[in-house]
């Protein structure tokens, strides 16, 4: 059994160096997408090089993945609360209509 794979993986984690799945040091790049303009990410150094296969390694470099998950959770909570408020408002309108109907009936008597 060879320990070189596990020890090299350990060294990479300890040193904080990100390596792609090709075992090459990941390259820091900036996103050019409309959704994440200028956002830094790590990728395979062979990506976008003519004729070289690349491993599709990708990782945001700014650590915002956790923030995005939290934001998504908060957004879902707000959407749920918005639906609840819409339902409450709907119920209030229905009650108001019932009160107005009763008032009209009482006036007509």
Image (tube, helix red, strand yellow):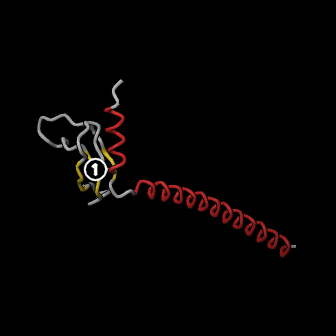
Which residue carries the number 1 mark? 42
Picture quadrant where residue 33 is located:
bottom left
Label 1 sits on a secondary structure element that is: strand
Taking the view exactly as shown, the residue that stands out farthest to the left is 50
Q: Residues within 10 Å of mark 1 (few under 14, many from 20)?
A: many
The answer to whether 101 is drawn above or below residue 30 in the figure is below
Q: Which residue occupies the foreground of this view, 13 or 88?
A: 13
Q: Which residue occupies the foreground of this view, 88 or 24?
A: 24
Please state, as top left, top right, bottom left or bottom right, where the C terminus lies in the image: bottom right
Taking the view exactly as shown, the residue that stands out farthest to the bottom is 107
The answer to whether 44 is drawn above or below residue 34 in the figure is above
The answer to whether 59 is drawn above or below residue 95 in the figure is above
Picture quadrant where residue 1 is located:
top left
Can you give x and y, in whole percent of width and height, for residue 44 in the image? 24, 43
Taking the view exactly as shown, the residue that stands out farthest to the top is 1
Left or right, residue 13 beside residue 84: left
Left or right, residue 47 beside residue 41: left
Can you give x and y, in whole percent of width and height, for residue 85 in the image? 64, 64
Q: Residue at x 86, y 73 (%)?
A: 106
Q: Residue at x 28, y 41 (%)?
A: 20
Can you give x and y, in whole percent of width and height, for residue 70 in the image? 50, 57
């Amino acid at each position: 059994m060879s320990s070189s794979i596990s020890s090299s993986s350990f060294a990479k984690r300890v040193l904080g160096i990100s390596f792609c799945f090709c075992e090459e040091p990941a390259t820091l790049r900036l996103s050019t997408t409309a959704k994440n303009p200028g956002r830094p990410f790590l990728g395979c150094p062979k990506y976008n090089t003519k004729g070289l296969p690349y491993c599709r390694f990708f990782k945001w470099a700014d650590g915002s993945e956790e923030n995005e998950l939290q934001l998504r959770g908060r957004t879902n909570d707000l959407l749920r609360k918005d639906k609840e408020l819409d339902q409450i408002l709907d119920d209030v309108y229905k009650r108001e209509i019932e009160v107005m109907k009763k008032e009209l009936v009482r006036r007509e008597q």
